[in-house]
Image (cartoon, rainbow, N blue to C red):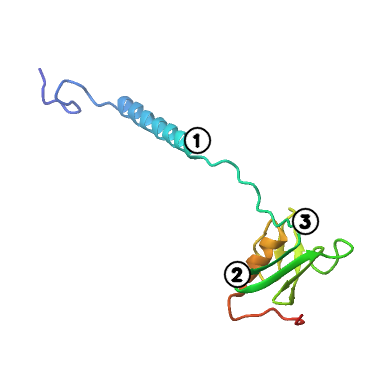
Amino acid sequence: MNDGAAGSVPGGERFTRRATLRNLIAVAVAAVSAQTALQWWTRQPAKEPLSDAIGDGSFDEMYAGRHIRGARAAGGHQHTGAGWDITVDGRPLHLMRRADGGYLSMIDHYQSYPTPLIATRGAVDELGRGQQLRGRNA
C-alpha cells in the first residue's frame, strides 16, 4: 500500500483535476442560484412615478426655503419652458422637454426629471442657498 502517495488524502480519496473542476462548477452554480433567489425575495414592487398634479399639474410651494411656482403656459408648448411658466422666488426658470418625455432645466441640464415640479426642485438643489436666478423680480 502506498499511504503517502502524492495527490491523496487520508481515507484514500484522490484529488484530480476533474473532481476539482466539478466542485468549482458546483460552487459557482450554488452562488448564482443564491444570488438569483436573494434578488427575487428582496425585490420591491414597482413604484408609481412621483406626481406633481394639482388639478392641471400646476404647483405653488416652498421648497428648501425657495418659493417655487409653476403652471402650464397659455397656448401649450411655447418658448417659455416646454409649455410651462416656472418661477423660483419670482424669477423665471426655463425648462426643456426631452425626447424621452422628461424635463431638464437650464440650471441642471445634465439630469432628466420626470415632471416639471421635480425638475424645478432639482434646479433649486443645484442653486444652493446663496445664488439667485437671473431675470425679472415678480
Residue 128 in the image: above or below residue 42:
below
- The residue located at (67%, 73%) in the rendering is 67
State how far apart marks 3 and 2 are (Cα): 25 Å
Instruction: Name the spot of residue 121 as percent of width and height, x first.
Output: 64, 66
Residue pointed to by mark 3: 55
Image quarter in which the N terminus is found: top left
* Mark 2 and mark 1: Cα distance apart in space: 35 Å
Residue drawn at x 61%, y 71% as measured from the top left: 126
Q: Callout 3: few (<14), some (14-19), or many (20+) C-alpha neighbours within 10 Å? A: few
Out of 120 and 60, give the one closest to the viewer: 60
Residue at disc 1, secondary structure: helix
Residue 23 drawn at (x, y percent): 33, 28
Tag 1: Cα neighbours inside 10 Å, few (<14), some, or many (≥20)?
few
Q: Nearer the viewer, residue 45 or 68?
A: 68
- The earlier-in-sequence mark between 2 and 1 is 1
Q: Is residue 76 left or right of residue 49?
A: right
